[in-house]
Amino acid sequence: MPIAFGAALGEVHTATGGASKTLTTTAAVPAGGLIIMQVYWAGAQNATPPSGGSLTWAVDKQQNGVSDTTERVAICSAAAPAGLASSTVLTANLAGVVGVIGVSAFYITGAATTTPVDATGGVGSSTNGTSATANVTTTNADDLIVQAMWVDFLATDITPASGFTEVYDLNHSDGFRIETGYRVVSATGTYAIGGTWTNPEPYVLAGVAYKAAAAAGGRVASRRPARLIYRGSR
């Protein structure tokens, strides 16, 4: 099975802070799915592994802001070997109380279920800008790259980096914008993550490339159909 986007699992964002935020999934995850959670917050606390679904979670990438170090983004994941029922409560966790938290999630299929992360990247703005860009350099040919971005005080849409399909583009109730997207690639290389918007604002951008599961014999499942060779009679 080639690596692919599955479905959105929902999002929640309020102006109320805390040390955690729960999200109730809006779709079922099939057996073998990899759940990807994006966490956005304002506060000088680091992300800790999420919880929920009796799954083993990891923080795959955290990116802190530069011009405002309390603006932070994390991308987390958990394999669901037996799948996950809809309406499961998942919880984003932080090391302490922060001002605001936003959480979104989706799942992907065909990903490696052990050590799924191939590469990461990210950037925080040192000045206000109308675009964010960073690189993720893959070492595995078949990957699905996830990007998650926070832009401060932005009411207009974010246009994601070339090749990315947007999953969420949300105006947070506390005045910032969060965007999440993905891109499937089939060759090793350096891929740009990020996006553009209208008025100059601070931003934080994180990206993670997830590996496709290995097929029988240890090779990554290919998207290319097998060639049929016809040998005529002599």
Image (tube, rainbow, N blue to C red):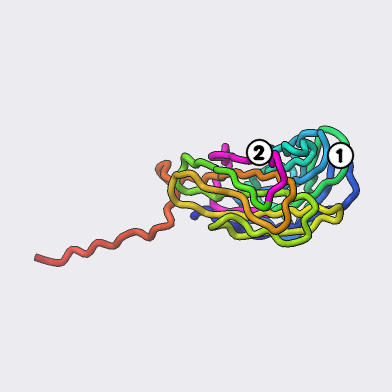
Q: Position of residue 133 (x, y in %)?
A: 60, 47
Q: Secondary structure at mark 1?
A: strand
Q: Which residue sits furthest left?
A: 234
Residue 87 in the figure: left or right of residue 34: right
Bounds of the magenta segment: 106-129
Amino acid at dot 2: Lys
Label annotation for residue 98: 1
Determine which quarter of the picture holds residue 60. top right
Residue 69, disc: none
Look at the picture and state if 203 lies above or below 26. Answer: above
Residue at 18%, 63% (x, y): give it. Answer: 231
In the picture, the quarter occupied by the C terminus is: bottom left
Marks 1 and 2 close (CB-CB < 8 Å): no
Instruction: Choose between 154 and 117: the one closer to the eye.
Output: 154
**Label 2 crowd bin: few (<14), some (14–19), many (20+), radius 10 Å:** many
Q: Which residue is mark 2?
A: 61
Which one is earlier in the sequence, the residue at label 1 or at label 2?
A: 2
Q: Is residue 87 magenta?
A: no
